[in-house]
Image: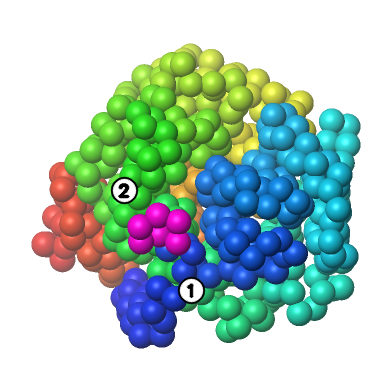
Amino acid sequence: MRLLHLSTAAMFILLVTVSTRAQDDHQHHHGAGEKLGKVNFRTSCSPRAANQFNRAAALLHSFGYEQASTAFSEVLATDPGCAMAYWGIAMTQNHPLWAPPTPGELKKGSAAVEKAKSLSVKTKRERDYLAAIDAFYQDHDKVDHPTRTMAYEKAMEQVFTRYSDDREAAIFYALSMLGTASARPVDKSFSKQKRAAEILNSVLNKEPDHPGISHYIIHSYDYPELASLALPAALSYSKIAPSSPHAIHMPTHIFTRLGLWQESIQSNLASADAARRLVAKMHPGHGSFDELHAMDYLMYAYLQGAQDEKAKQVLNKLKTINKLDDYVIAAAYSFAAVPARYALERGRWSDAARLILSPADFPWSRFPHAEAITRFARAIGSARSGDPASAHKEAERLEALRKMLIASKDPYWPTQVEILKIAAEAWIARAESRNEDALRIMRSAAELEDSTDKHPVTPGAVLPARELLGDLLLELGRPAEALKEFETSLQTSPNRFGGLYGVGRAAESAGDRKKAREFYLKLTALCEKADSDRPELGHAKKFLASN
C-alpha cells in the first residue's frame, strides 16, 4: 500500500510539474521573486488599488493573516474610498479553521466593517460581501461563535447564489462551510466538506493557479476516508504559492493522512525555513508560529521512521524559541505536543512523567487544550513507570481543564481532553492492577476518539487511543484481541511505527508468524532512514533474521 501511495504521489508530481504554467506573468509580486498565486477579485477600487487588493486577497487565501491585513491597509493608503479593503481587514480577523477570534480580533474586525459601511459602497455585490462578514461580527459580545459562523455561511450562500459567475464568491462560500463544519461536532458523513470540495473543483479548471482553491480542497478532504482525493491539490498548492510558509506546509496534511512520512518531512523542512525567513523580515528577533506548526508535523513524521536523532534536533530547536510573532493555537499546541511526542512515541515513560509546560512565560491559561497534552503525557508516563498517585493528580488536572473548556463554550476541545483523561485513567487502573477496569475504560476512550476527528492544528493524536488499547491488551496477554485493535488503528493512522510494530508483535505472540513477518518487513522498510536503536526495531530485525 505504501508503494502504491508513493507511485501515485510521483505520478501527480510529474503531472503537476508538466502542467504548471510559467508563473511570472500572473503571480502577485511585492518583494523580489514573491509568488502567491493568481487572484482576480473584482472591486470598484482604483486600478492601482485593485492590483494591490488582489495581492492582499492572495495572502488571505493562504491564511497569511498578518501580511494580508497590512496589504489591505496599503490598499486604503492608495484608495481611501475602497470599502472592500475594510472588508479584507475584517476577514483577516476571522480564522475559520483555526480557532475563534480573540476579543481584540473581534473588536478590530467589527470596527473595520463599521468603517466600510460608513463609506459609499459602489456596487450591490460589494454591499452583499460586506453584509456577509457583518453577519459574523454582529452582536459578537452576545452571540456565540458557532451561531455567528453559521450566520456568515448562510450570508455567503446568498452571495454565491446571487452572483453565479463570481468565482471568489464560490471559493469563500466553500471556506465558510468548512468553517461551520469545524466549529461544531464532527459529522462523519462529511456532507459539508464534500459539498465545499464539489464547489471548489467546479472552478479549479477555470482558475488553476488560485491559491485558495487548492488550499481549501486540502482542508475539505483532510480526513482518513477522503485524503487520497486531495493528493493532486496537495502536490500543486506549494507550487502555486511558494512564498507562503503555510502553502508549503499544507500538503503535509495529506501526506500525514496517507502515511507518506518522507514527503511530509521534506515539505515541513521547507515550510519551517520559509517561516524563519519571513519572520526575520517582519519581526526580527522573534520566532514564528508557522515554524512551530511545521516542527510539530516534523516531529511526528521523524518519529514514525525511528529518525530519533532528527527528532531530537527538532526538540532542541523548539527549546530555543521563546518570543513569538503571534501567540495562537498552533504555537501553544506545538510547544506542548513536540516534547510529549518525543517522550511518548519512544516509550520513555519516566521522561514523559517529568515534562513541564515550557516556555514558562507563555500564556498557557489561554490554551487549556494545549496544557492538557502535557498533563496527559505526565499521567501516562507516571502510570506506566509505576507511580499511579502522580498519575491521578494529572488526571484530576485534565478534568479541570475539560471543565474550563466547557465553560468557554468551546465546541471541540472538551471532547478531546476527555479522551486524554479517560485514556490516562485506563493506564492508572492498569498500574493499580485493576485490569478489567483498565480495558473497559480504554475501550471507551477509543470509541470516543473514533467518533471525532483531528483538528487541523495537529498531525494526529499524541498517541491514538486505539493503539493504546492494543498496547494494553498485549500487556495483559491477549494478543489476538490486540491484533484487531492495532489493525483498526492503522486504517485511520496508516504507517504509524506503533501500529505496524503492534500488529507484528501481536501476530507473533498469537502464533501467526506469516503476518508477523509481513508487518515487521513493513516496519523495517518504513525505518530505512532510522538513526536510532529502538528496541522494537531491533526485535523486528531479529525476528526477520530467524524467520
Please give the name of the residue rendered at 36% of the width and 85% of the height, measured from the top-left corner.
18
Q: Measured from the top left, where is residue 327 in percent x and y?
A: 53, 30
Q: Is residue 423 left or right of 44 when viewed as pictured? A: left
- Location of residue 425 (image quadrant): top right
Please give the name of the residue rendered at 35% of the width and 80% of the height, measured from the top-left corner.
17
Residue to which mark 2 is pinned: 273
Q: Measured from the top left, where is residue 252 in percent x and y?
A: 42, 59
Q: Quadrant of the C terminus?
A: bottom left
Q: Main secondary structure of the magenta part?
A: loop
Circle nearer the N terminus (2, 1):
1
Residue 97 vs residue 306, the one in the foreground: 97
In the image, which disc is placed on residue 83? none
Please give the name of the residue rendered at 29% of the width and 58% of the height, measured from the top-left corner.
266
Residue to which mark 1 is pinned: 26
- On screen, residue 39 above or below 395: below
Question: How far is disc 2 from disc 1 in space, using C-alphas?
Answer: 25 Å
Please give the name of the residue rendered at 39% of the width and 45% of the height, measured from the top-left corner.
278
Q: Quadrant of the N terminus?
A: bottom left
Residue stretch rendered in magenta on the structure: 29-34
